[in-house]
Image (cartoon, helix red, strand yellow):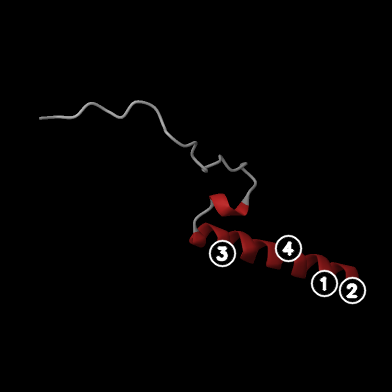
Amino acid sequence: PIRPPPSGRRQPTNLIELPDGDYRKHTNTVRRLIDRAKNVASFRSDYESYS
């Protein structure tokens, strides 16, 4: 026999929706690409400030 679904949640879930800008929302690969792009941008701005 097939059971009916449980009636409501007993405890509230601890999951929250992360904002779009939150780094935890991305996979590890995407996070690495974002970090690499930030490093390149930082390097370029440092280079331009010294020249």
Tell me where residue 49 sits by quadrant: bottom right
**Residue ranking furthest to the left:** 1
Please name the residue that numbered disc 2 is placed on: 50
- Residue placed at 59% from the left, 43% from the top? 18
Of mark 4 and mark 1, the one earlier in the sequence is 4
Tag 2: residue type? Tyr
Q: Secondary structure at mark 1?
A: helix
Count of numbered tags:
4
Residues at marks 2 and 4, CA–CA distance in whole angstroms: 14 Å
Please name the residue that numbered disc 3 is placed on: 32
Residues at marks 3 and 4, CA–CA distance in whole angstroms: 14 Å
Q: Verify CB contact (< 8 Å) between mark 4 and mark 1.
A: no
Task: Look at the image and tell me whether residue 51 can be seen.
Answer: no
Q: Quadrant of the N terminus?
A: top left
For residue 38, which numbered disc appears in the image? none
For residue 41, which numbered disc appears in the image? 4
Tell me where residue 50 sits by quadrant: bottom right
